[in-house]
Image (cartoon, rainbow, N blue to C red):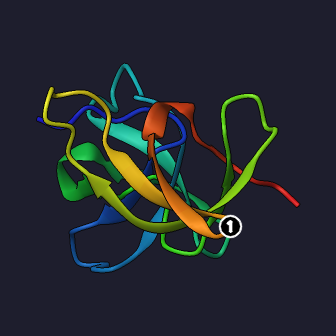
């Protein structure tokens, strides 16, 4: 079973096929196990079953990202690709006139 955490981008695979959002709270406890709160594209928070969700890549092609200390700006070209050692996925990033690879764990979405 996939583990979900706050901040994950997800897609609902139930009747609302294609609806996507970001997990903002959860997992819920008590009478609502197996559920999380997701903010959808319209900004509405809803409760989703984790059994009806799939995790989406953290970054998309064209996203502007920075390295872990925020000193360099890159553009995501492709990814994520699986790490051969079982670690975080990695992306190919465009930087000036060339390309670099970066592990997902040291990338942050650039907020202009």
Q: Nearer the viewer, residue 107 or 48?
A: 107
* Residue 55 in view: no
Q: Secondary structure at mark 1?
A: loop
Which quadrant is home to the N terminus? top left
State the residue at coordinates (76%, 46%). 72
Residue projecting furthest to the right: 112
Q: Nearer the viewer, residue 36 or 20?
A: 20
Q: Residue at x 34, y 35 (%)?
A: 4
Image side of residue 12 versus residue 105, left or right? left
Q: Quadrant of residue 11?
A: bottom left
Q: Residue at x 21, y 38 (%)?
A: 83
The residue labelled by disc 1 is: 43
User: Which residue sits furthest top?
Assistant: 30
Which one is nearer the viewer's eye here, 34 or 13?
13
* Count of all numbered marks drawn on residues in the image: 1
Q: Is residue 50 above or below residue 95?
A: above
Side of 80 relative to 83 (left or right): right
Seen in the picture, residue 88 relative to 82 is either above or below; the reply is above
Percent x, y for residue 90? Answer: 36, 45
* Image quarter of residue 74: bottom right
Q: Quadrant of residue 32?
A: top left
Q: Is residue 34 left or right of residue 20?
A: left
**Side of 30 where 81 appears, left or right:** left
Q: Position of residue 31 (x, y in %)?
A: 33, 27
Query: Residue 105: x percent and y percent?
Result: 48, 31
Compared to residue 23, the image places residue 3 above or below, namely: above
Q: Is residue 109 visible?
A: yes
Q: Residues within 10 Å of mark 1 (few under 14, many from 20)?
A: few
Compare residues 39 and 106 and report the one nearer the observer. Answer: 106
Q: In the rendered image, which quarter contains the C terminus?
A: bottom right
């Amino acid at each position: 079973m996939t583990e979900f955490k706050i901040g994950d981008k997800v897609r609902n695979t139930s009747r609302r096929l294609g609806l996507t959002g970001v997990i903002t709270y959860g997992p819920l406890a008590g009478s609502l196990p197996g559920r999380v709160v997701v903010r959808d594209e319209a900004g509405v928070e809803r409760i989703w079953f984790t059994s009806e969700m799939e995790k989406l890549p953290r970054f998309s092609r064209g996203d502007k990202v920075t390295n872990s200390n925020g000193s360099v700006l890159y553009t995501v070209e492709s990814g994520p690709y699986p790490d051969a050692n079982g670690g975080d996925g990695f992306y190919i990033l465009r930087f000036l006139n060339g390309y670099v690879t970066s592990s997902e764990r040291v990338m942050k979405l650039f907020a202009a």
